[in-house]
Image (tube, grey):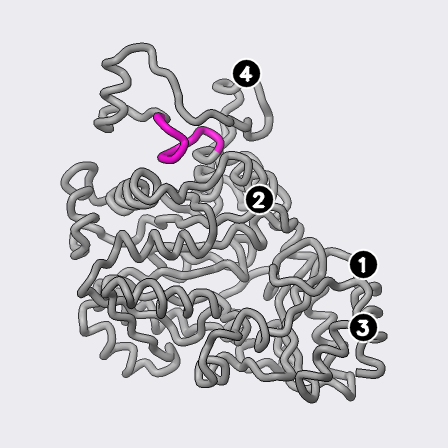
Amino acid sequence: MFQPATRGLRTRAIHGGIHPNRNRGATTVPLYYSSSFAFDSAEDLADAFEGRHPGHIYSRISNPTVGAFEQRMAAVEGGVGSFAATSGMAAIGALCGVLAEAGSRVVFARSLFGGTVIYLREVAQRAGIHVDFVDLEDLPALERALETGPRLLFAEALGNPRLDIPPFDRVIALASSAEVPLVVDATLMSPALFSAKECGAALVLHSTTKLITGNGTAIGGVITDLGQFDWSGHRSPAIAREVDRVGPGFAFLAALRRAGGLSAGVTMSPFNAFLGALGLETLALRAETQSRSALELARYLTTHDRVTDVRYPGLAGDRYHERAVRFFHGGSGPLLTFSVLDRASAFTAMNRLRLALRATNLGDSKTLVIHPASTIFHECSAEERDYSGVTDGLIRVSVGLEDLEDIIGDFDQALADA
């Protein structure tokens, strides 16, 4: 019998969530496309609605395929459970909706993906949630922000596209002292390269669109409760209600499923969960290959006379290399950035690429490039772009699974006349 707690990550990523004895011997996650599910009796259906025994009622709330993917994600992360949402942004929205409400405060690291910044500014703040943006390198400022009683502290394991790594040991010490749950967005690293649980996080979040699924086919997001935070003391009314109903151990997940699934309907589709579960089976292998190729491409770019300011934490000379060695394991992921003279030079180089695709995703099996200033950060302020290192000459690269010689050759010919 498979015992997740006693197996390695690769084994958990392949076997988690599969129960052949329940699914006619199926060796992969079965795809259940059904809007609702029948019960043997009216009493059984009523018990399921009341939560007296588990059961899938309606796929907006839960679904067997989505549930299997959630179990596999929880097994990989070492958590008590997961909730799969329609997208990474939907997961962030559901998270804020459960832990905060109008009049409450949340703390977010200043180094954030542009889409997250826009959500906070145009949705969360308009809903009456006060957002403090804090540079996590400024520990006194972080301590002051945590003293205001925020409902959560949110940070990215690796900034996008700043490629910075928080000082997790000091950040978690302050968050724990203030009894504030630390939420880590580990999208750029995945469970194969980064353990949010080992860093002391309460929750870990992923856009499964990226490295988890790994092939650019399906949008999704997932939040996992790592079982390291006592929810009985949290001030969210939604959490308090579930503490009384199901106990502190599962209060967050119960509140998230009620708010995100039952009320908001942002539950992941069964087919996208199916693709995510398949992606997890090869995650560790892909992460290893992409990290190795990204490092070699970064090394090549540092030698090119038309390139400046190559950023990749795996490089020995990178300003965050020491933290990458300390907090990451098996590599620094597929993402790197480099700069050329200006916007025109960046566009010229990108347009000359023959193998790499100009697209906004990352963690894909294909190498992708994007110009952040004109795309994912085009609605951010000059100050926000400057802090994130987004200049007119910056190009972001998500290294894929192609042969390394072909990847480097493509950039070599593209930069020849840029």
Location of residue 388 in the rendering, given as x and y in whole percent from the top left corner: 49, 79
The amino acid beneath tag 4 is Arg
Secondary structure of residue under mark 1: loop
Residue 348 left/right relative to 9: right
Residue 208 left/right relative to 267: right
Location of residue 320 in the rendering, given as x and y in whole percent from the top left corner: 53, 77
Query: Local crowd at mark 3 within 10 Å, few (<14), some, or many (≥20)?
Result: some
Question: Which image quadrant is residue 304 in?
Answer: bottom right
Which is nearer the N-term, disc 4 or disc 3?
4
Q: Disc 4 vs disc 2: Cβ atoms closer than 8 Å?
A: no
Question: Which image quadrant is residue 97 in?
Answer: bottom left
* Residue placed under numbered mark 3 in the picture: 352
Q: CA distance from mark 4 to mark 3?
A: 52 Å
* Residue placed under numbered mark 4 in the picture: 24
Residue 396 vs 32, above or below: the answer is: below
Which is nearer the N-term, disc 4 or disc 2?
4
Which of 181/394 is in front?
Answer: 394
The amino acid beneath tag 1 is Asp
Q: Which residues are magenta?
A: 57-65
Secondary structure of residue under mark 3: helix
* Residue placed under numbered mark 2 in the picture: 280
* Residue placed under numbered mark 1 in the picture: 403
Whether residue 345 is in magenta: the answer is no
Q: CA distance from mark 1 to mark 2?
A: 22 Å
